[in-house]
Amino acid sequence: MPLTKILKPKGGCKYHRLLLKVDGKYKVVFKSTLKSEVNLERSKIRAKAVDTNALVSKKTFVDLYKEFAEHKIKVGENERLGGKMTSMKTYLGYYRKHIFPNFDKDILINEVTEDVAISFFEKLNGLGVSWIQTENVVMTFQTALRYAKRKNYITSIGPMEDFKCRDQEELISKNPKDMKYKVTPMITLQEAERLMAYFDPTKKNNPSTKDWMNFTIVALFLFTGMRMSELRGLKWKAIDLINKTITVELTLVGTEKGYGKKDGSRRTYRIHPNLMPILIQWKAKHTRHFTPHKISWVFPSLVKTDEYIVPVCDRTIRDMLNVAYSDLGFAEIKWVSEKGREAKKRIKVIWSKFGTAPTKTFRHFAATCLWDAQNSNEALTDNFTLNYIGHQSAEFSKRQYGSHKNLRGGKEYEAKIDQALKNAIPLTSGVTIDDWSKNHGNLPKDDPFLNGVNDEN
């Protein structure tokens, strides 16, 4: 693969220049005022080149991807490398479900170009795979090719280095919604208050240790926006009740321990004042329940045993929340028998306002509350909010988590909005809502058309 580099305009020069290494020296082979044109020319040079390493190995891209996916599994199995097995398994899933059945098995590694990627995208999307899922699969080509470069199967990734599905005109979906990730529905302030009241042990007769634990779990989710894996991995040494801080470091996905995502997840932040008494009370109940044993997990299984105590199962938390959502009218559930175990029941969610992940809504709630309150609270800087939520980019956090518009709801809030709109746009007319005969063609108030039954766009 030819060695190239691009020089930016500087001094009195207005051109981006493409240099190609020939006989040990770089020579200008193309120049333009537009960087995009220089990048295009570079891609053409790379595409025409023959990668001798790939020709010698005769390794196809399908074979490479399998090797790459199996390598990722080994990374996940090595605790010291930090890769989560759940994330690493994704690549093997892509190989088995999409790459092996559908990718041309004659294409060598060095023959994977933008045209090949576009063609495969169109094929996969045409088979009914969603636009987002297809994009996720195709964009792993770059990761697989970088692996090939490290293994010296190829000397360069070539034109795929800067490839993005969203930059290809022929791949843009006619329906813009197809290209958008699903937005997690956010619990509103009123709904959050109802959920807190539902679990509040002070409102129950003789509340159990389990009642206190469930309430503390929900409170921690709502006040901090913690991830499920972070909450399950929480140990008492991470909660400083004297200095009023929580340190998020250890995570737990299933039984797999980790240390959070790379960017911003490991953090220490101040405990919300209204969360403090809840944590103090739970600490007391927790200690009393397990005495004489000292259990480090903040939310352990409550079964008393001399054996090793494990953290509460994520399914237990999801089921607990889904039952509450059902009781509050946020979801519909039913109990079904497990396959092969008729006596053992599990919860099946028929529908839920908060989708299939009942805890993600809390991160959106906490982030939206913090971003929404920035204008009136000087202390809530971008850095404060990013550290609290565990994000690195303010732009990403505001777009993905803080963009919900329905934080507050209810008649009282709607009345305030109505008044604010009147103040902002003080136009008036002689039309009134009660003047039915004058403004609705003599239709009666109970006519189905007026109630939206026959509403036509």
Image (tube, grey):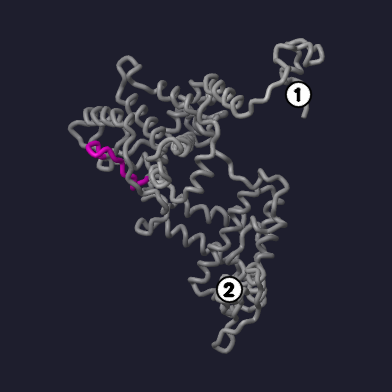
Total numbered labels placed on residues in the image: 2
Q: Amino acid at mark 2?
A: Pro
Left or right: 177 in relation to 390: right
Indicate the quadrant where residue 163 lies. Answer: bottom right
Left or right: 229 in relation to 304: right
According to the picture, the residue beneath numbered tag 1 turns out to be 455
Quarter containing the C terminus: top right
Residue sitting farthest toward the right: 441
Indicate the quadrant where residue 430 lies. Answer: top right
Range of residues picked out in magenta? 240-251
* Residue 440 located within the stretch drawn in magenta: no
Task: Report the residue at 41% width, 39% height from top.
Answer: 228
Q: Secondary structure at mark 1?
A: loop
Query: 336 and 332: which one is in front?
Result: 332
Residue 202 at what x, y percent from top left?
Answer: 32, 19
Is any atom of residue 203 visible in this view? yes
Is any atom of residue 57 visible in this view? no
Residue 296 at what x, y percent from top left?
Answer: 25, 40
Quarter containing the N terminus: bottom right
According to the picture, the residue beneath numbered tag 2 turns out to be 9
Q: CA distance from mark 2 to mark 1?
A: 59 Å
